[in-house]
Image: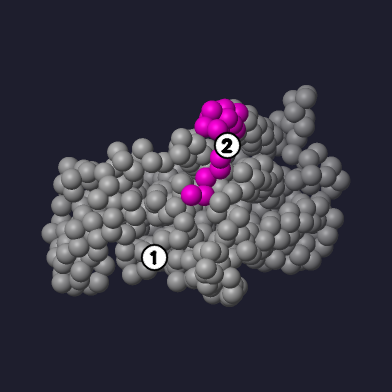
Amino acid sequence: MLSTAAILANTPPQLLPARELMAFTLASHILLVPFGVALPFITLLMHHRALRRNDPVALKLARRWSAVMAIQFAIGVVTGTVLSFELGLLWPGMMGRWGDVFGLGFGVEAWAFFLEAVLIAIYLYGWRRLKPWTHFWLAVPLPLAALMGAFGIIAANSWMNTPQGFNLDAQGKPVDVDVQQAIFTPMFGPEYWHFVVAMLLTAGYVVAGVYAVGWLRGRRDRYHRLGFTVPFTVAAILTPVQFMLGDSAARAVFHKQPIKFAAMEIVWKTDTHVPEYLFGRLNSDGTISGGLKIPQLDSILAGFKPSTQVTGLTSVAASDRPTAVQATIAHWAFDIMATVGSVLILLALWYGWCWLRHRDLPRSRWFFRCAAIAGAACLVTVECGWITTEVGRQPWIVYNHMRVSEAVTATKAGSLWAMLGIVMAVYVVVFGAFLAVILKLRTRWRIADEGLAAGRTGLPPESDTPYGPRSEPEPAAVGTAPGGGSDRTSGGAS
């Protein structure tokens, strides 16, 4: 059996910088994904409420969220394009051999991306240029396009975790590709629905968190109340659903990727009555340092009974499994994800209990403090989910068919380190510009709401931007206005 040091010694020198570059760009891009996938749905939900109830405050929120949605999409174009190039530049071995099998997923994602871009442009153009309900219905396909993009990416990733839909010829090259099987792999369903619901509740908690901060700062008007309630309600409803989907996905990993499951739960030897470790660190000799040990719980969670046998890491050669460090990383990421999910269920129950009893928001400032933190916590869990998926699969880039070291580029390590430095610098500028634009919009919206725009030169009021009403007088009813109701309703922006 090979030792960890021997395994690392046999890896090409360019593997580490290639991994670091891919990890950085993926970790950066995935912070934007919840808003690309879920913000269109939340925006249209608010838009529908505005038109159905003749609610100018809801219309104002929908219009402003559409501006953020467009800016976020533009930043996503940059980070997503970098990722698509990196797949071919950093991992030519995988794309060259397996691209014909699982590449359709990336094709679907590309088509969905262009469709989403067109629909966002139509939606932005339609404010005050289309009839209200016509404008709304033209935007309804937008969330569907976002879901289609997620479909393509998850189809490709789930194939890497449970590859199927092909045969191998005498040279080991895939032939006789069955596209349907290659897309709908055993992990596709659990992974897709777990991912989609994660995006929806993450976007909901993040958007609600903005207005929770405003609420804590004393802005208790209807604008902040509505801006908090709608996205938080979506997230709160989906939180227990996500917990069940996550449990189902983990059980699917237990059946389809037993070595990854062993890494996630730091199980060293195959056995029954396996304990569950909350956090803790796996050592190279199989011992576990630290953490909270709960007897038999891992077997119970995996198979609903203590006698369930859980496959251990030592059931395969050391070269075919994650190292002790990689297993610990996957385990911590998984435990953080599960812990945050459990806490969010308590927050959702708190909200639901107060709403059912009093038809009102909780009055405790601690609730709004927790709600403000929930969005950031969800972004952490999104990162942890991908860490679990990718690190737990090591050393395979295509599970049990191709190692990461076999797929990596032949480019010199020094060049890759330099590329990583350049990409990091560019991303700092890109994300800095993104935050600057968002803060600029927030300032304009607040000035417009406070009625101070006329006295501030060099800072156009919202009514002069494409996302607000024009200077002409507005009809009184939202449902009969050329593009929605008045934005001159009182209330401060967060």
Q: Nearer the viewer, residue 58 or 36?
A: 36
Q: Is residue 459 above or below residue 153?
A: above
- State whether residue 130 appears in this view: yes
Q: Which residue is mark 2?
A: 411
Neighbours of disc 1 within 10 Å: few (<14), some (14-19), many (20+):
some
Asked whether residue 411 is drawn in magenta, I would say yes
Q: Are marks 1 and 2 in contact (CB under 8 Å)?
A: no
Q: Picture quarter containing residue 346? A: bottom left
Q: Which residue is mark 1?
A: 249
Q: Quadrant of the C terminus?
A: top right
Q: Which residues are magenta?
A: 406-424
Q: Nearer the viewer, residue 391 or 80?
A: 391
Instruction: Please give the name of the residue rendered at 53% of the width and 64% of the height, measured from the top-left corner.
Output: 171
Q: Is residue 397 left or right of residue 490?
A: left
Q: Secondary structure at mark 2?
A: loop
Q: How is the image coloured?
A: one colour
What is the three-letter code of the residue carrying label 2? Thr
Instruction: Please give the name of the residue rendered at 45% of the width and 39% of the height, measured from the top-left corner.
Output: 12
* Residue 324 percent location from the top left of the image: 27, 45
Q: Secondary structure at mark 1?
A: helix
Q: Give whichever of discs 1 and 2 has the lower sequence position.
A: 1
How many angstroms separate mark 1 from mark 2 (CA)? 36 Å
Q: Nearer the viewer, residue 427 or 166?
A: 166
Q: Is residue 57 above or below residue 442?
A: below
What is the three-letter code of the residue carrying label 1? Ala
Asked whether residue 105 is drawn in magenta, I would say no
